[in-house]
Amino acid sequence: MSSGGESIEKFRSLSPAEFFYRNREIAGFSNPSRALYQTVRELVENSLDACDNHGILPTVRITVFPENTKENHYRVTVSDNGIGIPPRYVPQAFGKVLFGSKYKLRQTRGTFGLGAKMAILYGQITTGKPVEVRTSPKGSQYSYFFKIMIDIEKNEPIVMERRIMKRKSKRHGTTVSVVVEGDWSRARSRILEYIKRTAMGVPYATITIITPEKEAYKYSRVIRKMPPPPREVKPHPRGVDIEMLKAIIASTKSSTLKDMLKNAFQSIGKKSAEILLEEAGIDPNKDPRKLTLDEITALVSSMRKYNKYRPPRTDALSPLGKDIIEAGLKGVLKPEFAYAVTRKPSSYSGHPFIVEVGVAYGGEVPLSPDKGPILYRFANKIPLLYDEGSDVCWKVVSDANFNWRQYNVKLPDRIAVLVHICSTKIPYKGVGKESIADVPEIEREVRNAVKEAARHLRLYLSKKIRAEEEKRKIMTLVKYVPEVARSLSILSKPPASDGNPVDYESIKSVLMKIIERRARKIDGLNIDLRELIIDVG
């Protein structure tokens, strides 16, 4: 109660849409330049996931066209050949924040259920225009068109227009078009770099972007091999907490605690379930729904202390693999040497992860800075462009923390390192998903993977150095061939089979053949001996 002139404090709740409307900068929409980049990124990620998760080789087309040059409004349109979206889900998929198909325990590009919705919300509050969605689900005879806005206060979709059309072709997929306030002149380099890196990470895709200047940049598919799609898995008991266990209890169909643990978690069998419940002091045959809060807390503590679990299953992960990473590096950077490493699965806090590293050297690789190699960071196949200095990957590969000279690399040099981390839960430092936290287990795996790839680079460079040394020696020998041949023909003059003396040309030819045999035995030596023979003639 209030007394005197005191005012009564008013309380109200915020819907998820209203929360992100008020705090859009935490999702990467902090200014027109960053927002335009983020819009392209979120829509492209959705398109690639719609293809990857169903084994479809992606073909993605992006257009960024000025809608209103005076107001700096741009229409961003992204089309794909993915599985399509069932029409009954389209309004909520694009008009309800924190609604989507990614709330499963498996690797996906997006994790927060924001993605396209944040771009749509940002476009709505800066331009007042609805998102336009056209989808042709695979196997359907119809295409569906929607114009949707978001009711910010209720976090519900407002369908402004809905149309059904008979399909004229068998093409399936989704096209999303949204108008946002943006700054193309500042965002241009970031967006084009993002597309380039995306093409590097998914070389099995064909990606085209058309800019406001009507310039087209196309990255054609260079490999048809795709990574295996991730599968949904049960949670690992190492990562359980009180609220997770409450949710599992609320949804379980098991009649006993022992059965619930076996059915709800991976790496728990009959014996381990009995050990966990005995440690927690709970009857294995008790009905899970009758557990008290103290018993739930005790069970969580018991599950965390147990250290004989099998490692988390990796079915939920979709690593790129050696062939795809090397194809991506060669297709975009065109190096003289490329090598990739995929580490064995590991885990942190019950979350499985895999680290992959590719190294590209020489050729058309840009010159690196002297502080470290050019770094291409990927998390669940997403290229990360911002906040590189705070990322655990830069911490590992920077020259201050990694002795590149030990691997015959003297910075600056034409060297690039690609690091891909895939997990059911990437430990991002913020909602913007641009920097990975310093998790000790991840840092260790990244360091070991970089070392392994760098050892192969050192082997290549050592062979190259030896070959160059041998080339110099052979070039020196070749220079003296005429003089030696002439001297031998004069001094020895050995009789031939017909009694005539061996001439100068014959001796020179023999000497060149000896040198040629030596050159062929040297791995990595690239000398055109025919030209040398002409030169010494």
Image (cartoon, rainbow, N blue to C red):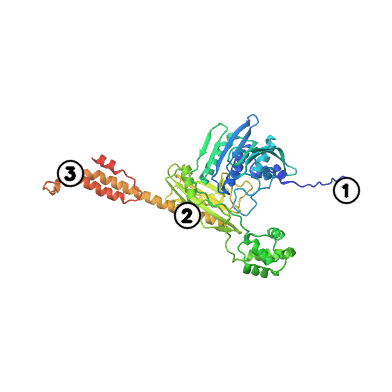
Instruction: Confirm or deny contact between disc 3 and disc 2 (CB under 8 A).
Output: no
- Cα–Cα gap, marks 3 and 2: 54 Å
Residue 7, picture quadrant: top right
Identify the mark at residue 51; answer none if there is no mark. none
Question: Which residue is identified by label 2?
Answer: 451
Is 11 situated left or right of 430 in this image? right
Residue 61, picture quadrant: top right
Question: Which residue is identified by label 1?
Answer: 3
- Cα–Cα gap, marks 1 and 3: 120 Å
Query: Nearer the N terminus, badge 3 or badge 2?
Result: 2
Return the residue nearer the eye: 517 or 404: 517
Label 1: how many residues lie within 10 Å, few (<14), some (14-19) or many (20+)?
A: few
Question: Which residue is identified by label 3?
Answer: 504
Return the residue nearer the eye: 23 or 134: 134
Q: Residue furthest top?
A: 70
Residue at (42, 50) in percent of width and height: 408
SS of the residue under disc 1 = loop
**Mark whose residue sits in front, 1 or 2:** 2
SS of the residue under disc 2 = helix
As shown in the figure, which amino acid type bears the numbered disc 2? Answer: Lys
